[in-house]
Amino acid sequence: MEYKQLGNHYVMRVDPGEEILEQIQTLCRMENIRVGSAVGLGAANKAVVGLFDTINKVYKKKELTGPMEITSLVGNISTKDGKTYLHFHVNLCDEEMNISGGHMNACYVSATAEITVTKLDGTIERRMDEEIGLNLYRF
């Protein structure tokens, strides 16, 4: 991963074999990013996506493999218990031009991924909401 800072934006290139969330975590640690957002695109060969089951309060996960275009990657950065917390979604296009996507648990780059992270001032902490079953923003 390489990146360049432009004001409060960080333009990243994630390289083949690297996992995107790990690289965003690294950037956040290196640049002390506590709250922000990110958008990106690229190419992947393995991803794990999920869907939150609101009835049973669990994530259902699916592993996707093969050549895929990352047609949309969006997410936010906050903190939970004082540590960086990433919440990302991804859409992936396979060789048949079918789109799959959901909550991004992992996404491995096959060629490149180009991601722009925007750093905001301050912090937004998350806490588990037992009724909903998710870590929600607390203001």
Image (cartoon, rainbow, N blue to C red):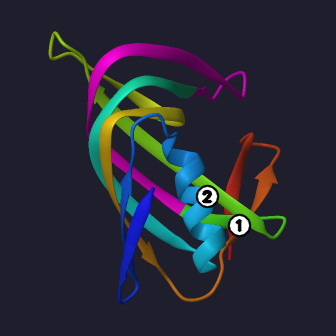
The residue nearer to you, when weighing 54 against 89, is 89
Find residue 73 and report its horizontal and vertical position in percent: 35, 46
Q: Which residues are magenta?
A: 52-76
Find residue 53 and report its horizontal and vertical position in percent: 61, 24
The residue nearer to you, when weighing 20 against 72, is 20
Amino acid type of the residue that numbered disc 2 sits on in the rendered structure: Gln
Would you name the residue on which mark 2 appears?
25
Crowding at mark 1 (Cα within 10 Å: few <14, some 14-19, many 20+): some
Q: Quadrant of residue 54?
A: top right
With respect to residue 121, does 38 lie above or below?
Answer: above
Q: Which image quarter is the N terminus in?
A: bottom left
Find residue 104 and report its horizontal and vertical position in percent: 51, 36
Q: Main secondary structure of the magenta part?
A: strand
The residue nearer to you, when weighing 105 against 54, is 105
Relative to 38, is 62 on the left or the right?
Answer: right
Amino acid type of the residue that numbered disc 1 sits on in the rendered structure: Thr
Relative to 128, is 92 on the left or the right?
Answer: left
SS assignment at label 1? strand
The residue nearer to you, when weighing 41 against 77, is 41
Crowding at mark 2 (Cα within 10 Å: few <14, some 14-19, many 20+): some
Give the foreground label among 1 and 2: 2
